[in-house]
Image: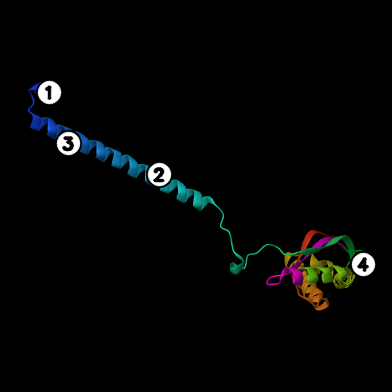
Amino acid sequence: MAPPAAAQNPEERKQRRLLTTVITLNTVSLVLLLASIGVGVALSMTKLNRPEKKGVAEGAGMPGPSLRIEDSVYNLGEMNRYMKATMQVELDVTGMKEKESADFFDEARQRLPWIKDLVISEISGKTYRDVSTPAGKEQLKEELRVRINALLSRGEVKEVMFTSFAVQ
């Protein structure tokens, strides 16, 4: 049994206080260490769940301006076969200054009647079989892109996209 506190000599009280202080400091240090680990884990989890932002240098920029070719019905190159589609023609303005980009968009918009005529001509030469498969649609989009690029003098079409598509 330990003697009462009053009976302890001053040296023992000093050692007890020192031991209590060391234990308290170690406990506080441990709590701070665990808290900082928790914060670090929480921050890293937040960073992992956040989608990456891709820069222009990596090739992922915002979509360029586009022209809409309204929903139209096209005659295919076969009797009683039709294609109905709406298209977006995205212009490639990568590396262009704002003025150049605006001029290019204006040119493309002014040439829209010729672009629509070109689309009609291109589609009327296709058969149901040509445009009814995914590969056929991709080929048609690429052919349209190349042909439209031949009409434009200031820039290029980046992509032709079907926003609605049906064949019968």
Kindly identify which residue carries mark 4: 79
Kindly identify which residue carries mark 1: 5
Q: Few, some or many C-alpha atoms within 10 Å of disc 1 (few <14, some 14-19, many ≥20)?
A: few
Q: Quadrant of the C terminus?
A: bottom right
Q: Decide if residue 49 is on the left or right side of residue 150.
A: left
Q: Earlier in the sequence, mark 1 or mark 2?
A: 1
Q: Are marks 2 and 3 in contact (CB under 8 Å)?
A: no
Q: Is residue 12 visible?
A: yes
- Numbered disc in front, either 1 or 2: 1
Q: Residue at x 87, y 70 (%)?
A: 110
Q: Earlier in the sequence, mark 2 or mark 4?
A: 2
Q: Nearer the viewer, residue 136 or 9?
A: 9
User: What numbered label is drawn on residue 18?
Assistant: 3
Kindly identify which residue carries mark 2: 38
* Amino acid on which disc 3 is placed: Leu
- Numbered disc in front, either 2 or 3: 3
